[in-house]
Amino acid sequence: MERNVHYHVMDFLRIFAALLVLLNHFATFAWSSASVTEGGDVAFGFLSAFAGLGAVGVEIFFVISGFVVAMSAAGEGGVSQALRFARMRASRILPALWLSALVSLAVRTLYGGDFSHLLMDFGRSVTLSPKGPYIDGVVWSLVVEAVFYVLVAASILSRFRLSLYDLAKIIGFSSSVYLLILSGLHFLPPSTRPEEAISVLSRFPFKLLLLQHGVFFATGMIFFLVRNGGDGRSEMGHAGKTVLILLFGCMGTAEIFMSVERGYAYKTAAVIVWLMCMYAMAAGIRYNEFIKYKISDYHNFVRYIGGISYPVYLNHYSVGMVVVWWLFSLGFSTPIAFALSMLCVLGLSMAVMSLEKRIQNAIRRGFPRPDAKRDQMAV
């Protein structure tokens, strides 16, 4: 079973997803204050097509996470392996989160926010508390990721009873049932649609339970198991796993269609982007060696853009809102303000990534192990 392979398609999809989310948020930033708006004070009206549509980047990240986490969790079970997995995920997620949360705390305080409230938001963010609010609007997705990690760690601990494939089916099927119910309510005629029930089912606890987004994690996990022949205990063959990918992919398509709160043209565009990314992922996994050969001269650059996608994701929202407001308050024109705000987010993300790597290297030196190469490939 291949576990030390680096799939370059994931690097391309990561930066693409991060840019989608960034443009989705920048399309709603106001120029008159550090806030989001749907009114006449939108800072970058030319990005309006990305408002709502760009949120599909989060779902793409969840599929990538399912694949990468399955790759890092594959192998023998037991307490030591569960601890190794937990350390790998913590060193991958927490350093950049903590650094970015500090930046958001500083920027929002300078903007004039209540420091005591912001400090509580900061504490909830760095501990990945299941209850918000958070210091930055994107932290909720990391809390959902953390729930997924806990389930995978439990699977590793009980590997003799629950395989990764079993876990993928449990997450995927439970999420599919939830999405079927939610879809049925959404597609009722407006006059009979129970808006209150839809509102309740759309609350954050259903995200925490992996019901709204579980099909995305499950899809990524099964992508990995199909590519690598399962986990040694699966009785369902390649065709059965392909059927599950199609099923969970269809339910993911329904979730995206429902979650885009704009007209049918935008919903359809989001679905098309999602399907194209899933096709690219499947093709990129299958033809990884060919891609590796073609980009051999740009290997380090591709790895870099994949790595910087996470800091970009973490540092564009709260910081971006304040920077956009500040640039407009200084009198910069829209094109200049957009270019400078992009450069600010990029520069900050590069700095966070550099510090993140130093922290991760220190952690690796503190935990020497024979499978260091595998850990590096699986992040």
Image (cartoon, rainbow, N blue to C red):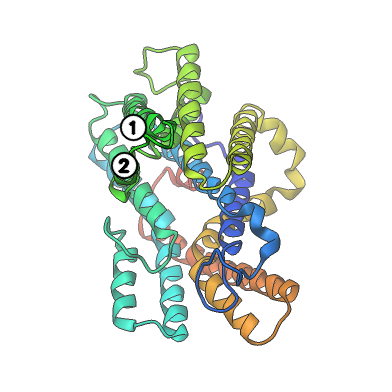
The numbered mark, 2 or 1, whose residue comes first in the sequence reads: 1
**Between 349 and 6, the one nearer to me in the picture:** 349
Residue 146 higher or lower than 8, as above or below: below
Q: As shown in the figure, which amino acid type bears the numbered disc 2?
A: Leu
Nearest to the observer: residue 205 or residue 185: 185
Q: Residue at x 41, y 70 (%)?
A: 101
Please give the name of the residue rendered at 67% of the width and 59% of the height, measured from the top-left corner. 47
Q: Amino acid at mark 1?
A: Tyr
Estimate how packed mark 1 is, as few (under 14), some (14 to 19) or many (20 or more) residues with alpha carbons within 10 Å: some
**Mark 2–mark 1 CB contact (< 8 Å):** yes
Q: Is residue 272 left or right of residue 86?
A: right
Q: Indicate the position of residue 180 as horizontal and vertical percent values.
A: 38, 28
Tell me how far mark 2 sits from mark 1, CA to CA. Answer: 9 Å
Q: Is residue 149 visible?
A: no
As drawn, is 150 to the left or to the right of 290? left
- The location of residue 13, given as percent across then percent down, is 61, 44
Judged from the image, the secondary structure of the residue bearing numbered disc 2 is: helix
24 above or below 350? above
- Of badges 2 and 1, the one in the foreground is 2
Q: Which residue is mark 2?
A: 201
Residue 65 horizontal/vertical position (percent)? 46, 42
Q: Quarter of the image holding residue 293?
A: top right
Task: Say if 79 sits above or below 330 in the image.
Answer: above
Q: Is residue 118 visible?
A: yes
Location of residue 19 (image quadrant)? bottom right
Q: Say how many tags the image has.
A: 2
Q: Which residue is mark 1?
A: 178
